[in-house]
Image (cartoon, helix red, strand yellow):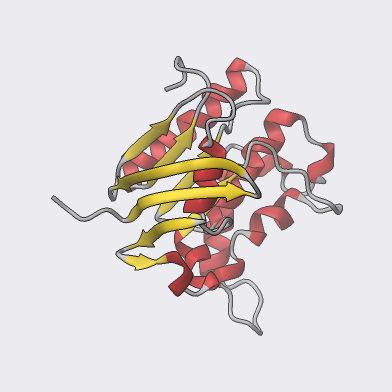
């Protein structure tokens, strides 16, 4: 069997005196789709943030291809791991295309703008999430469902190997939720995208 692409060993997370995650060991294999379930406050979102390299473990290790996350350059992690939060609320006015283009930041030259690969990735992510028609609109003008699809487009524009989803349908109605999950399922099935998703709804799983 292949080795896990992403793995934790004896992972423990504390915030001050509060224990959020305790002794978790798990592996996520290339091309797999894993759902994480549990009651509120169980540490699901915290675990996902640790896998994304956004939170440092209090104890234990997280590795990508056998190398500790802390030993990877941030730019390299951003090329390989994308994280979709429950809700994305930009702190400034930005168009849909501008937000999706931020997903290409780790792939760009430090001095150059978008190249052909960037344009293809942006256009492809907009098309995959059915958000091309919104490209010139401000993100702040969109409905919750439309905004979440745009956030997914930004994650897909990263062209990641691993996609981490933190209860991505929490604020969506059933139709929008199904549409977003269909996009993720196609990427997993057709392109071998490794997906780790936190859910609160067993029916969606």
Q: Residue furthest front?
A: 17
Q: Is residue 203 left or right of residue 66?
A: right
Residue lying at 40% horizontally and 57% vertically, measured from the top left: 60
Above or below residue 107? Residue 169 is above
Residue 43 vertical position relative to residue 125 in the rendered view, above or below: above
Residue furthest bottom in the image: 111
The quarter of the displayed image where residue 110 is located: bottom right
**What is the total number of numbered labels drawn onto the structure image?**
0
Q: Is residue 87 visible?
A: yes
Whether residue 38 sits left or right of residue 89 in the image: it is left
Residue sitting nearer the eye, 60 or 105: 60
Residue 181: x and y in percent read 49, 30
Q: Is residue 33 left or right of residue 96?
A: left
Q: Nearer the viewer, residue 196 or 23?
A: 23
Q: Is residue 87 above or below residue 175?
A: below
User: Is 21 or 87 nearer to us in this picture?
Assistant: 21
Q: Split into 4 quadrants, where in the image is the C terminus?
A: top left
Q: What residue is shown at x 66% (from left), y 50% (from top)?
A: 16
Name the one closer to the observer, 143 or 23: 23
| Residue positioned 33% across, 42% down in the render | 190
Q: Position of residue 35 (x, y in %)?
A: 40, 32
Residue 131 shows up from this direction: no
Residue 168 picture quarter = top right
């Amino acid at each position: 069997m292949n080795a896990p692409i992403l793995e934790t060993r004896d992972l423990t997370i504390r915030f001050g005196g509060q224990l959020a995650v305790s002794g978790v060991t798990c592996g996520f294999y290339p091309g797999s789709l894993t759902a994480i379930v549990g009651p509120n406050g169980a540490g699901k979102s915290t675990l996902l943030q640790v896998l994304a390299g956004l939170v440092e473990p209090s104890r234990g290790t997280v590795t990508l291809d056998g190398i500790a996350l802390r030993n990877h350059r941030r730019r390299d992690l951003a090329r390989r791991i994308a994280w979709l939060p429950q809700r994305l609320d930009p702190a400034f006015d930005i168009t849909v295309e501008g937000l999706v283009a931020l997903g290409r930041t780790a792939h760009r030259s430090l001095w150059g703008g978008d190249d052909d690969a960037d344009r293809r990735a942006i256009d492809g992510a907009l098309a995959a999430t059915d958000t091309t028609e919104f490209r010139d609109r401000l993100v702040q003008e969109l409905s919750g469902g439309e905004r979440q699809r745009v956030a997914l487009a930004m994650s897909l524009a990263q062209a990641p190997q691993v996609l981490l989803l933190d209860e991505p349908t929490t604020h969506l109605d059933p139709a929008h939720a199904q549409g977003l999950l269909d996009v993720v399922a196609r990427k997993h099935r057709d392109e071998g995208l490794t997906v780790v998703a936190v859910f609160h709804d067993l029916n969606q799983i």
